[in-house]
Every structure is written in C-alpha cells, then in structure tokens.
Image: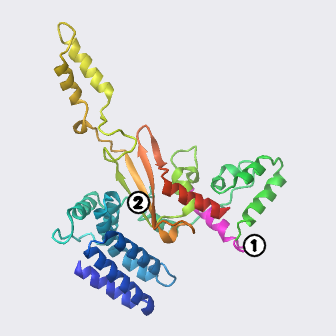
Amino acid sequence: MKRLTLIVLAALMSANFAAAQTAAELFQKAKAQVKGESWQNAMKTMDALDAEAARPGNENLKKQLEAPLAFYRGVCEANLGQAPEAIASFQTFLADQPNASMDPSMYSKKAVAAFEEARKTGAPAPAVPNGSPSLFNSYLEFKPPANISDPPDEKWAEGPVQWIMTVEEKRTWAGLSSGGERVEFVEKFWEARNPKPGTPDNTFKTGFERRAAFADAHFNQDEKKRGSLTDRGMVFVLLGPPTYGGRRPIKHGEDPSEPIGQTSVGGVNAAMALSSAVGATQNGRLASSQVAVIADQYSGPGTQAAQANNYQEVWHYRKELLPKGVGYLQVDVSFVTRQGYGSNILQRDPQTLTTLDAAKRKAG
C-alpha cells in the first residue's frame, strides 16, 4: 500500500497548508498505529482525521481521504472482530480502487478474509433502490418538487412531522377543531424551531421538508405508506444521509431472532418425512436410530436453506453527522429484511435509539 500512502500525502500537501500539515500528521499516526496493531487507537486517530477533513474548505481533502481511510478502517474493524463493518469499509475502498489487492504477508488472516469477501460481493449496494451511486450523493443531487410542504389539514400530524412533535404538541393538536386553529398551530410549530426567530428563512423547516421529500421519493415500500413514514424514512428525516451505507445478505447464525442451530428447512418438512417413513413400515413404527437419521437430514447447519431475499442494510453515521451531545464516534443503523419479518425493519439497539432520541430533542 506504499503507493496509496504517497498519493494521499501528495493530495494532503496540495490542500490548505496548515490543514494539510495536521491531516498529514494524523494520517501518518493512524498508519503507524495500524502497523503497530493498535486498532482502537488507530480508529480514534482516523475519527480525528475525519473531523479535520470535514472542516469548511477541506472538501477536496475529504474526498482524497475517503478511499485510504476506508481501507485502514477495514483493517482495524476486521482485527476487532467487526467483520460486517470491515467488509463494508473494504467495499468502499474497492469502489475507488477496484484493482487493488491485499498482501497477506502484511495483514492478518481476518483482514484478508474480509477484503476478499468485499471483493467477492462487490461494491456496496446502494442504499437507495434506484441504483444511485450512494445515498449521500443522491441526496445532494436531489431536486424536490416545487411545493413540498404538507398542507395544515387534519392529517398534517400523521405525516413526517410526527417524528419531531413533542407529546405536548400532539396533545394540543388533537384538541384543535377548526382549520384556522390548525394553520396557526403549524405556523407556531415551525417558528419554535426557527434558528433565526422572526425571519422568513427557516432553514430547519426547509431542511426537514427536503429530507422528507427525498424519503417519500426513495423509500416507498407499498402504495399505502409514504416513504418518510417507513423506518428508513424516519431515520433519514431525523439524521439525514449517512456517511456511507451498504447492503449484504444475512447469513445463518447472524440473525439474532434465529435460534442457534435452528434449521431453516422447517419442522414441517421433517414431520412429513417421518410420516412417510412410518407409512412405509409394516408395523407403523420406526426405531429410534431411524428417527434420528431422518431428523438429522432436516436439522443442523448443513440443512439451513439459503434465503436470497433476506438481507441487512446498514447506514454508518460518523461523529460529525451525529446530533450534538451524542458521544459515540460512529453509529451503525441497521435495517433487516426477512421473509415473515418485514421489509427494512429498524433494529432498535441502544446506540440507535439514543441517537434518534437526541435528534428528536434537538428538533423540539
């Protein structure tokens, strides 16, 4: 990866000198920490480098750092036992450097395995179903309809504003009966969130409605529900586009709702096979050894049926995109699609719920 390092350093030095000097130092520090197998410290250094690159005026620097940082993050994540995250990071790297390879003499077996899995599965599947290159870029290029504000009618609170309304606001809204009262409520609702009270340029309202319009356009799952009211739409409305996202099939044993060792073929199949075997005997009985052999054919890891439509979509939010007050360096928001479970169902882990609650409090 020596050539990669030289390219990055050259890019850093071509940016603003002071920023480039700091970034170059951080990049070399992270690289040394990776070499010294100090995985957690390397991740912290890369977070600091991300923050430096996110400063205004460092747009070119941020773009140049994306691929190499994704590579080194992948190395760290693999060695920390975070294989799914490592694969997603390597996919991001390979999208920029498709012909790159990993030297097995320089990196661990875990890192090499994750790298090869990323190459095999290809670049991260776009989180947006329309095949756009990335969710972040798609949002930047999104052109919302001319009028994206929901009318202040009796159904207004059933729209995406429900994600940011306080309990008290919902109670007040429920008690309104006239159109004039609703119009006045909506005006006060947005003014209470105006970063510059009293001015017509309410950037909070504009940004919220733009995110809701994007979610409506891209996250529809059926004709009965708006995209902004789905789980993905709710997260997007509250947090905006993630740093990056990817999608991969769920492998057996990775689904927390699936008991370890449970067959995916199903008990019904085993029961039918046993019934057929019993019917073929003269006395209507099977020896315990025969029952065990048949049952074994329909259980265990070797018989777990592949479910091509079962997948997990993960949106990675780095610290600079998280609401103020959230102490995590990165939050990975996961959505699971599985037969009999649902489509793109938000996995409500503590980090995700804490982050979403912080976004709601900020809005209120």
- Type of amino acid under label 1: Pro
C-alpha distance separating marks 1 and 2: 38 Å
Viewer-side residue, 229 vs 283: 283
- The percent coordinates of residue 14 (x first, y second) are 38, 90
- Type of amino acid under label 2: Pro
**In this rendering, position of residue 241 left or right of residue 155:** left
Give the vertical position of 80 relative to 3 (above or below).
Answer: above
Viewer-side residue, 79 vs 198: 79
Q: How many numbered discs sit on the rendered protein? A: 2
Give the vertical position of 10 relative to 64 (above or below).
Answer: below
Q: Quadrant where the N terminus lies?
A: bottom left
Marks 2 and 1: in contact by CB < 8 Å?
no
Q: Visible in this render: residue 183?
A: yes
Residue beneath the point at 39% across and 90% down: 21
- The percent coordinates of residue 161 (x first, y second) are 66, 55
| Quarter occupied by residue 81 | bottom left
- The percent coordinates of residue 292 (x first, y second) are 20, 24
| Quarter occupied by residue 295 | top left
> According to the image, label 1 marks what residue?
197
| Secondary-structure class at tag 1 | loop
**Callout 2 environment at 10 Å: few (<14), some (14 to 19), or many (20+)?**
some
Q: Is 210 a magenta residue?
A: yes
Residue beneath the point at 18% across and 25% down: 293
| Secondary-structure class at tag 2 | loop
Residue beneath the point at 22% across and 38% down: 302
Give the vertical position of 168 relative to 28 (above or below).
Answer: above
**In this rendering, position of residue 356 left or right of residue 331:** right
> According to the image, label 2 marks what residue?
126
N-terminal of the pair, mark 1 or mark 2, is 2
Q: Which residues are magenta?
A: 195-216
Magenta stretch, main secondary structure class:
helix
Residue beneath the point at 23% across and 70% down: 99
